[in-house]
Amino acid sequence: MVFSWCFLPQHMDAFDQSIARSLSRTAVVRITLTEPPTGKRKQYDKEGVEMKYGRME
């Protein structure tokens, strides 16, 4: 609820109703990372178009 209040205060009047409607199909999962997360940033060509699928400039 704190997250909703900070980022969506205009919708807080519908919070309880929304939770009641979707709680039966909501799962909370906790994961523990054994290593720090890593990733690659997206690459863009000179025109600003994302280079997908290994495309080289």
Image (cartoon, grey):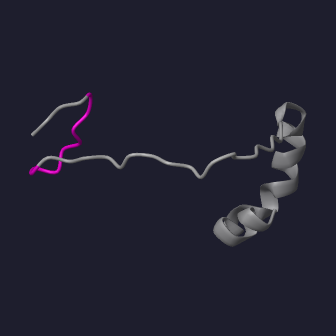
Does 4 sit above or below residue 45?
Answer: below
- Whether residue 45 appears in magenta in the rendering, the answer is no
Q: Quadrant of the C terminus?
A: top left
Q: Is residue 35 left or right of residue 11?
A: left
Q: Residue at x 70, y 69 (%)?
A: 9
Does 47 sit above or below residue 8?
Answer: above
Q: Which residues are magenta?
A: 46-53
Q: Is residue 52 left or right of residue 32?
A: left
Q: Residue at x 79, y 67 (%)?
A: 2
Q: Is residue 49 left or right of residue 10?
A: left
In this view, the residue in front, 10 or 50, is 50
Rendered image quadrant of residue 51: top left
Q: Count numbered badges in the picture.
A: 0
SS majority, magenta: loop
Residue lying at the far front in this picture: please name it: 35
Q: Residue 13, position in %: x, y?
A: 80, 62
Q: Quadrant of the N terminus?
A: bottom right
Residue lying at the far top in this picture: please name it: 53
Q: Residue 45, position in %: x, y?
A: 14, 47
In this view, the residue in front, 33 or 6, is 33
Does 6 sit above or below residue 32?
Answer: below
- Whether residue 51 appears in magenta in the rendering, the answer is yes
Q: Residue 49, position in %: x, y?
A: 18, 44
Rendered image quadrant of residue 54: top left
Q: Residue 40, position in %: x, y?
A: 38, 46
Q: Residue at x 75, y 46 (%)?
A: 32
Q: Residue at x 73, y 64 (%)?
A: 3
In this view, the residue in front, 36 or 8, is 36
Q: Is residue 24 left or right of residue 42?
A: right
